[in-house]
């Protein structure tokens, strides 16, 4: 599949409108356009990869580093009861491109709705633009703080 045909490639490489909160040379972290909860993020490699089994060590580390940053931002801003990290492969991947979901969760939620094609999910509590700005700012402060700690 060419990268022009792949929605995941276009999203990760910002060739389509996205709400980007973090990126490095390997991946982009964007707000899910139809979030399960406010703060729901997708981590998407910029290179066309369909499955995690195709990752090299550098991509593995990059994805897990992004999971840490996004999780810290979600916890710091939204204080959820927990976070679910999931990846759907094969025929269950709507993008036919690897992407990992990082989803804030709260007591009493039925996460099975996330996997139902006809599941009804409540509208997010705030506009994606607002969530995007909060998450991006928080992650930038985390990265800056870690950089300062390494310099000392």
Image (tube, helix red, strand yellow):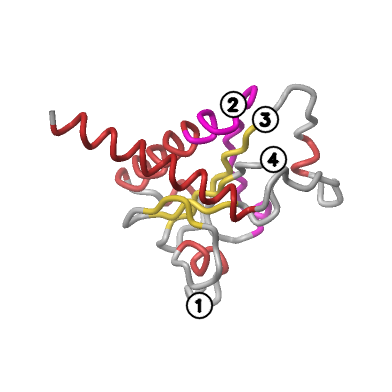
Q: CA distance from mark 1 to mark 2?
A: 38 Å
Q: Say which of marks 1 and 3 sits in front.
A: 3
The crowd level at tag 2 (other Cα within 10 Å; few <14, some 14-19, many 20+) is: some
Magenta residues, start to end: 73-94
Residue position for label 1: 4
Secondary structure, mark 2, is: loop
| Eye-nearest disc, 3 or 2 | 2
* Residue 4 position in % (x across, y down): 50, 77
Q: What residue is shown with label 4? A: 37
Q: Using residue 61 as the reference point, say whether residue 38 is left or right of it.
A: right
| Residue at 41%, 41% in the rendered image | 139
| As drawn, 40 above or below 13 | above
Q: Determine whether label 4 and label 3 are within 8 Å by CB.
A: yes
Residue 53 image offset from top left, x and y in percent: 45, 46
> Which residue is denoted by mark 3 in the rendering?
105
Mark closest to the chain's N terminus, 2 or 4: 4
What is the C-alpha distance between the residues marked 1 and 4? Answer: 30 Å
Q: CA distance from mark 2 to mark 4?
A: 12 Å
The foreground one among 9 and 109 is: 109
| Residue that label 2 marks | 79
Q: Residues within 10 Å of mark 4 (few under 14, many from 20)?
A: some
Q: Tag 3, which secondary structure?
A: strand
- Report helix, strand or loop for mark 1: loop
Between the C-alphas of marks 4 and 3, the distance is 7 Å
Q: Is residue 6 above or below residue 112?
A: below
Closer to the chain start, of discs 1 and 4, is: 1
Q: Quadrant of residue 65?
A: top left
């Amino acid at each position: 599949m060419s990268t022009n045909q792949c929605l995941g490639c276009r999203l990760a490489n910002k060739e389509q409108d996205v709400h980007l909160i973090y990126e490095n040379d390997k991946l982009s972290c964007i707000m899910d356009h139809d979030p399960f909860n406010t703060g729901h993020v997708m981590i998407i490699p910029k290179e066309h990869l369909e499955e995690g089994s195709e990752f090299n060590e550098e991509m593995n580390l990059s994805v897990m580093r992004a999971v840490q940053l996004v999780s810290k931002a979600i916890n710091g801003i939204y204080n959820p009861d927990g976070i679910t990290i999931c990846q759907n492969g094969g025929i269950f991947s709507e993008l036919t491109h690897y992407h990992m979901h990082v989803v804030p969760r709260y007591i009493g939620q039925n996460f099975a709705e996330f996997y139902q094609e006809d599941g009804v999910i409540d509208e997010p509590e705030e506009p994606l633009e607002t969530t995007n700005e909060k998450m991006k700012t928080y992650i930038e402060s985390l990265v800056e703080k870690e950089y300062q700690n390494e310099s000392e």
